[in-house]
Amino acid sequence: MFIMKNTTNLMMMVALFIIPLTGLSIDVYVPSLPSIASFYHSSANNAQNTISIYILGLGLSQIICGNIIDAYGRRKTLLASLIIYICLVLLIITSKSINYVLAFRFFQGISMGFIAVSARSVFVDLFSGQEYYRKASYMTIAYSIGPIVAPAIGGFLEHLFGWESCFYFMFIYALLGTILVYLYLPETIKHKTPFNLVTICSRYKNMLQHKEYVLNLISLSMLNSSLMVFALVGPFIIQNKLHYSPIFFGQMALLCGLSWFIGNFTNRLLIEVGRNHKITIALIVAVIDLLSMYGLSFFWFNVYVIVIPICILLVCTSVIFSNLFVHSPTLFPIFAASASAFMAGFFGLLSSGICWVLTTLISVNTQVPLIFGYASLILIIAICHYAVLKISRRV
C-alpha cells in the first residue's frame, strides 16, 4: 500500500511539473514583447497578438481534446503533444517574419491544449471524492507558478541573451517534461471511451444548457483575462513610457504572479468558508481597489500606483478563479473530465477575444485605460455572480 501511494504521488508530481508549462509559454517572454516588436519591425499590437493567438489555439484544442484523450489515453497523447510543442518552439526561434511567429504560436497553443488537459486528467484518474478536491487545489497552485517565476526569469534572459533565449527556456522545460512523462508516468486511464461524435455533441448541449455552468464559464473568461491584461500592456507602459528595464518589469510581473499565488493559497486556507461568500467578499475588495487606483491616477503616473493596486486586484480574482475552476466540472459528475476540458477551452477562447479587444482599445500611455479595462472585467464577473446567487436561492 505504501509503495502504491508513493507511486501515485510520483505520477501526481510529474503532472504538476507539466501544468505550469501552460502559463510559462506566455509569461516567460512577456518582458521581451517590445524587443520582439522591434526585431520584426512590427507594431506593439502584433507582438501582443503572439500571446492572444496562442490563447486562441489553446482554447480551441481544449474544447475538443478531452474526448480524444479519453479515447486514446493520457500518456501517448501527452508525449506526442510535448514533442510537437518542442518542434514548434524551434520553428518560432528560427522564424524570419512575425507572421510565421503568429502561425507557429497558434499551433503551439493547440499542442498545449492537449498537454494541459492530459496532465489535469491524471488527477481525475488517480483521485476521487474529497481527496480529489484536496489534490485539485495543487493544480491551481501549480498553474499559478508560471506567472510567478516566469516573468522574472524572462526579464533576466531578455537582458542577458535576447528574446530568443526565452523560447530556449520553453524548449528545455518541455524536454525535461517529456523525459519525466516517458520514465515515470504510465497510462492512468482505467476505461477508455470510444470517440463518438453524437455523445460529444450531447454532452456539450447539456453543458451549455446548465445556467450556473455557463455563468461560471463567462466569469472564468474574465478572470483569466485579468491575469493576462497586465502581461500584454505592462511591458509597453513600464519599459517604453516609464523607461524601466526588462529585468525591472520582470520583477513587477513576478509580484503580480505572486499575488495570484497568494489568492490561491488564501483560498486553500479558507476552504471551510462557503464558496459564494468568498467570491462576494473578493468582488467587494476588488471594486474598492479599482476606485482607489482611479483616484490615485489623477495625482501620479508611476510604477507604484499601477502595480500595487493590480497586485491587490489579482489576489481577489485568484480567489474567485480557484473556486470556480474546481467547482464547475463537478456540476457534471458523470463526465467531469470532459466538462473540465470544455471549461478550460471555452474560457481560453473567450479570453483570447477579450485580450485582443482590450489590447486594441487600451492606450499604453497612461494607467487610466488600463483601469477601465479591469473595471469592465470585474463588472461582468459581478453580474454573473449575482445571477448564480439567484439560481442557488431557487434550488
Image (cartoon, rainbow, N blue to C red):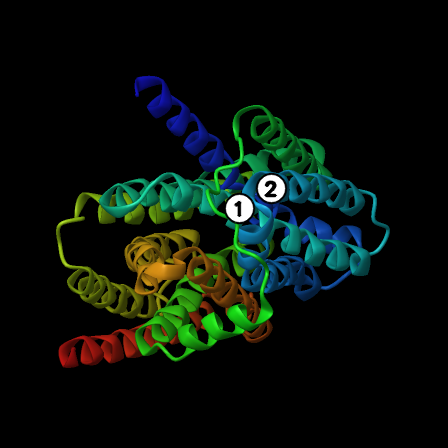
Residue 351: give its label.
none
Look at the numbered discs 1 and 2 and tell me whether their residues touch, using CB distance below 8 Å: yes
SS type, badge 1: helix
Residue 194, image quadrant: bottom right
Q: Please provide percent x and percent y for residue 300.
A: 38, 62
Q: Mark 1 vs mark 2: which is more N-terminal?
A: 2
**Dot 1: few (<14), some (14–19), or many (≥20) neighbours within 10 Å?**
many
Position of residue 294 relative to residue 90, above or below, is below
330 left or right of 268 in image: right
* Figure quadrant of the N terminus: top left
Residue corresponding to mark 2: 78
Residue 93, image quadrant: top right
How far is mark 1 from mark 2, CA to CA? 6 Å
Q: Residue, x 52% and y 69% (percent of image)?
A: 199
271 left or right of 155 in image: left
Residue corresponding to mark 1: 118
Q: Please provide percent x and percent y for residue 387.
A: 26, 80
**Dot 2: few (<14), some (14–19), or many (≥20) neighbours within 10 Å?**
many
SS type, badge 2: helix
